[in-house]
């Protein structure tokens, strides 16, 4: 059975923080096409804070512990709409996996589904509304399908990445219905949604990190 030691996998999240830091300017550029252009700055601020707190503890805090730390920072210390949104996702993912000594595909699927379910309780956006939901929903669906079909953890993660990327790309042809970009209506078509882009970066980075750890 493919799984990884949950107690020593905080490094997956530590590495994730660097991915967002490296993409700060790109995320702000995408956001600037239809919004106020601060998505990358705000995300990088929160992920940098998390990176600093995980420094030296990434191998002991555990996978769920690191996710919870990230979620708490984004929820309580980052402004804008995306902090609480991502905070909700991460904190509920952490809660779903906090008691697991090993993370296998079934456990990871439960964590991802818990994050999405909690988000659905606080946002009204649906697939097609040009938000991160367009990335997260198909990515979660791919993982849940992989569980039902008995696929390997590695294959499930690869399919999650592909679904996240396709979901991200789908937002280019959509008109925004939420957030600042919704003011543009039909004029918001033709560019990617910044939240969908950052969500894809996050999911792909987590997948790559897990792929390096599963045995």
Image (cartoon, rainbow, N blue to C red):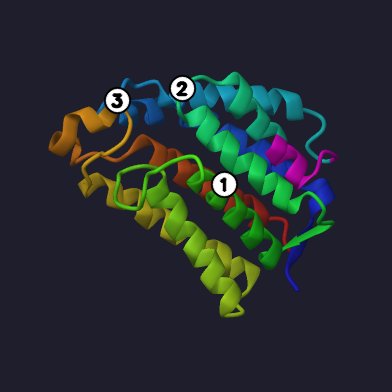
Q: Which residue is mark 1?
A: 118
- Residue annotated with mark 3: 35
Residue 174 at x, y = what percent? Answer: 22, 46
Q: Secondary structure at mark 1?
A: helix
Q: Is residue 33 visible?
A: yes
Q: Secondary structure at mark 2?
A: loop
Report the predominant secondary structure element of the magenta stretch: helix
Left or right of residue 110, residue 131 in this image: left
Observer-nearest of 145 and 206: 145
Residue 75, position as x, y percentages in the image: 60, 28
Determine the residue positioned at 67% across, 27% down.
Answer: 50
Say if the magenta span includes residue 183: no
Q: Residue at x 32, y 31 (%)?
A: 30
What x and y, as percent, mark residue 168?
36, 49
Residue 5's x, y, as percent? 81, 56
Q: Residue at x 46, y 21 (%)?
A: 41
Q: Residues within 10 Å of mark 2 (few under 14, many from 20)?
A: few
Where is mark 2, residue-wise? 80
């Amino acid at each position: 059975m493919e799984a990884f030691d949950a107690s020593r996998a905080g490094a997956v999240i530590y590495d994730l923080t660097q991915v967002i830091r490296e993409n700060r300017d790109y995320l702000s550029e995408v956001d600037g096409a239809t919004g106020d252009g601060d998505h990358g700055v705000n995300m990088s601020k929160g992920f940098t804070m998390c990176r600093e707190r995980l420094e030296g503890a990434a191998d002991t805090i555990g996978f769920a512990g690191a996710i919870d730390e990230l979620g708490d920072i984004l929820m309580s210390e980052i402004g804008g709409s995306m902090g609480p949104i991502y905070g909700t996702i991460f904190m509920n993912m952490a809660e779903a996996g906090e008691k697991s000594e090993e993370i296998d595909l079934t456990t990871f699927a439960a964590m991802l589904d818990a994050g999405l379910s909690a988000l659905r309780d606080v946002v009204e956006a649906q697939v097609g509304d040009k938000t991160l939901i367009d990335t997260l929903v198909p990515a979660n669906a791919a993982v849940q399908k992989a569980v039902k079909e008995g696929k390997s953890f590695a294959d499930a993660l690869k399919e999650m990445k592909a679904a996240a990327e396709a979901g991200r790309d789908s937002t280019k042809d959509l008109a925004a219905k939420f957030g600042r970009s919704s003011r543009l209506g039909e004029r918001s078509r033709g560019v990617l949604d910044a939240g969908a882009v950052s969500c894809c970066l996050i999911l792909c980075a987590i997948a790559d990190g897990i792929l390096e750890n599963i045995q």
